[in-house]
């Protein structure tokens, strides 16, 4: 059984869920932990001779300590780079929370110290006409890691996300401030102070914008800015 499983969400798409997940996995590896990760449903996949492949899932696959076949990490791969429920509809695939929960449970029974499950987009991204992705961590009762891009407007997005996570009966286990873009936020320290006081969860780290860095090298570099103790203690 995976000892600790977390669901990784963000205030939006493109905020750094994958980079942050990979950095957490690198930090856990450096601490001698066995790690697993999943991107259960991924849109925006590339056709390759081996089948559909998604950048997020490949980055997670590269960051974990356990060897896993691609399909186990990303069981639902969709080609168009559009919202997952629309991509699934177009591919004629039925995506339900229950199906994703089944894949996640299959991963959770593997031995590991830490398993990260990356969602898609933000907290209430739809899976189909009836369900949002939130139903997956909801059913699995997973604690949630929230990725917040340090940009103007992020306090509102972070507070709304944390409120929605808690309204779904789940715990925000920690949050990570990221810089997915070059721009520097004015009064960033005030924003960090506000979030530290009001988000009601530990800050696991504030990650810098990495300029001119190979994407494959980013997780190991960013892992040094994280304190993952709250995630792996006990
Ligand atoms: N700290 C950083 N420094 C430099 N580039 C970054 C940083 N964080 C994120 N990026 C870049 O920003 C982009 C978005 O990051 P990422 O793919 O991790 O976001 P995401 O939230 O997982 O997106 P999605 O919703 O598509 O899964 C990527 O190209 C990533 O390399
Ligand atoms: Mg991602």
Image (spheres, helix red, strand yellow):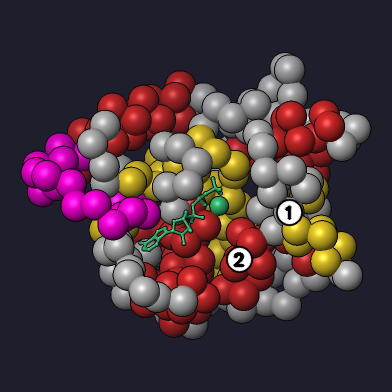
Residue 227 in percent (x, y) is at 31, 66
Residue drawn at (44%, 53%) of the image: 16
Q: CA distance from mark 2 to mark 1?
A: 14 Å
Graded by Cα atoms within 10 Å as few (under 14), some (14 to 19) or many (20 or more), the crowding at tag 2 reads many
Q: Earlier in the sequence, mark 2 or mark 1?
A: 1
Q: Nearer the viewer, mark 2 or mark 1?
A: 1
The range drawn in magenta is: 176-195
Residue 57 in percent (x, y) is at 66, 61
Q: Quadrant of the N terminus?
A: bottom right
Q: Left or right: where does residue 216 sit relative to residue 162?
A: right
For disc 2, does the CB lie below 8 Å from ligand 2? no
Q: Left or right: where does residue 202 sit relative to residue 192?
A: right
Q: In this view of the protein, can residue 83 be seen by the observer?
A: yes
Residue drawn at (69%, 22%) of the image: 131
- Residue 185 sits inside the magenta stretch: yes
Q: In this view of the protein, can residue 193 be seen by the observer?
A: no
Residue drawn at (40%, 30%) of the image: 161
Residue 77 in percent (x, y) is at 78, 50
Residue 38 in percent (x, y) is at 66, 57
- Towards the viewer: 111 or 103: 103
- Residue 161 sits inside the magenta stretch: no
**What residue sits right under mark 2 in the picture?**
60
Query: On the image, which quarter does residue 86 sit in?
Result: top right
Identify the mark at residue 45; answer none if there is no mark: 1
Graded by Cα atoms within 10 Å as few (under 14), some (14 to 19) or many (20 or more), the crowding at tag 1 reads some
């Amino acid at each position: 059984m995976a000892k600790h499983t977390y669901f990784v969400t963000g205030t939006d798409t493109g905020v750094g869920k994958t980079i942050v997940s990979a950095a957490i996995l690198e930090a856990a590896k450096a601490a001698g932990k066995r790690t697993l990760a999943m991107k259960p449903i991924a849109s925006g996949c590339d056709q390759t001779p081996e089948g559909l492949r998604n950048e997020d899932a490949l980055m997670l696959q590269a960051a974990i300590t356990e060897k896993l076949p691609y399909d186990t990490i990303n069981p639902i791969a969709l080609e168009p780079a559009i919202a997952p429920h629309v991509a699934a509809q177009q591919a004629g695939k039925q995506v339900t929370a229950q199906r994703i929960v089944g894949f996640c449970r299959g991963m959770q029974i593997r031995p590991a110290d830490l398993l990260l499950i990356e969602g898609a987009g933000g907290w209430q991204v739809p899976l189909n006409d009836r369900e949002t992705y939130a139903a997956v961590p909801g059913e699995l009762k997973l604690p949630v890691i929230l990725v917040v891009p340090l940009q103007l407007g992020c306090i509102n997005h972070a507070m709304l996300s944390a409120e929605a996570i808690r309204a779904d009966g789940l715990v925000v286990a920690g949050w990570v401030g990221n810089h997915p873009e070059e721009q520097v936020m004015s009064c960033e320290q005030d924003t960090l102070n506000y979030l530290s006081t009001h988000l009601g969860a530990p800050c696991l780290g504030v990650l810098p914008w990495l300029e001119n860095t190979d994407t494959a090298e980013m997780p190991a570099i960013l892992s040094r800015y994280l304190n993952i103790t709250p995630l792996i203690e006990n």
